[in-house]
Image: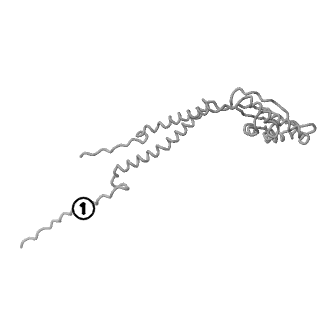
């Protein structure tokens, strides 16, 4: 009796080898986009200027730390109301967007960081904001009891702080590989489910298993007639 062998279905990943090309394609696309962004984006330079808050004569030295925190929060506003934009040669909106002030919890010092497309411009912006703080504190020193003095002027940066083209390409490649891997993790599950469903439809279920068609009840064979002895002739 000839029996037809059951056809074996390979895994979904082997039936579609081209699907794995998504991962290298995503890595290359991410590297190209990241490298292009790093090459086309204008480099940014950062310059940092430092000022320190000192107490006036007969003032509480501990008050200098509190006023340093206050000056750090309103540094850009004081610079805009002063002449910082004139000294730096930029607009007030540029100062607000590209200048940040940071304070220390342990010392009454304020760091002023300015970012610009040119190193000299970043230096002039940082020093301009610091000068505005010094002038403002001088005007209100009689009421505050403290004044701001220049601690360190900004130095001209020699290298940009924005990511370079190779670094941007590396970050883009990592992001592309991550997205490509997520796609591969999602798609094989769907393909495997479809393959298993197709295989279950083509393979007949064994009798007695759930879902198998009920087989016809066996008809019992007729019982053999019992042999009865013939009556004797008289």
Query: In the rendered image of this protein, does residue 150 appear above or below residue 209?
Result: above
The answer to whether residue 170 shows anywhere in this view is: no
The colour mode here is one colour
Question: Residue 56, percent across and down?
Answer: 91, 37
Q: Nearer the viewer, residue 219 or 178?
A: 178
Residue furthest out toward the left:
234
Q: Is residue 133 left or right of residue 157?
A: right
Left or right, 56 with respect to 100, comes to: right
Image quadrant in which the C terminus is located = bottom left
Q: Who is closer to the viewer here, 182 or 93?
A: 93
Q: Residues within 10 Å of mark 1 (few under 14, many from 20)?
A: few
- Which residue position is annotated with label 1? 220
Q: Residue at x 71, y 33 (%)?
A: 116
Q: Secondary structure at mark 1?
A: loop
In the displayed structure image, the side of residue 63 where residue 115 appears, left or right? left
Say which residue appears at 8% left-offset and 70% top-offset.
232
């Amino acid at each position: 009796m000839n029996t037809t062998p059951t056809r074996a279905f390979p895994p979904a990943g082997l039936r579609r080898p081209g699907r794995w090309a998504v991962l290298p394609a995503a890595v290359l696309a991410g590297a190209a986009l990241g490298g292009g962004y790093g090459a086309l984006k204008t480099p940014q330079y950062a310059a940092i200027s430092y000022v320190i808050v000192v107490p006036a004569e007969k003032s509480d030295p501990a008050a200098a730390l509190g006023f340093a925190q206050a000056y750090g929060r309103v540094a850009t506003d004081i610079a805009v109301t002063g002449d910082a934009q004139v000294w730096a040669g930029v607009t007030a909106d540029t100062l607000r967007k590209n200048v940040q002030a940071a304070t220390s919890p342990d010392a009454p010092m304020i760091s002023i960081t300015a970012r610009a497309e040119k190193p000299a411009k970043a230096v002039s912006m940082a020093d301009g904001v610091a000068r505005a703080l010094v002038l403002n504190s001088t005007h209100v020193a009689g009421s505050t009891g403290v004044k701001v003095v220049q601690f360190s002027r900004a130095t001209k940066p020699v290298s940009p702080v924005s990511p370079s083209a190779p670094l941007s390409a590396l970050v883009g490649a990592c992001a592309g590989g991550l997205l490509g891997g997520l796609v591969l993790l999602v798609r094989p599950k769907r393909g495997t489910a479809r393959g298993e469903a197709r295989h279950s439809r083509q393979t007949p279920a064994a009798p007695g298993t759930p879902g198998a068609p009920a087989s016809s009840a066996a008809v019992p064979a007729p019982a053999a007639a019992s042999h009865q002895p013939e009556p004797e002739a008289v």
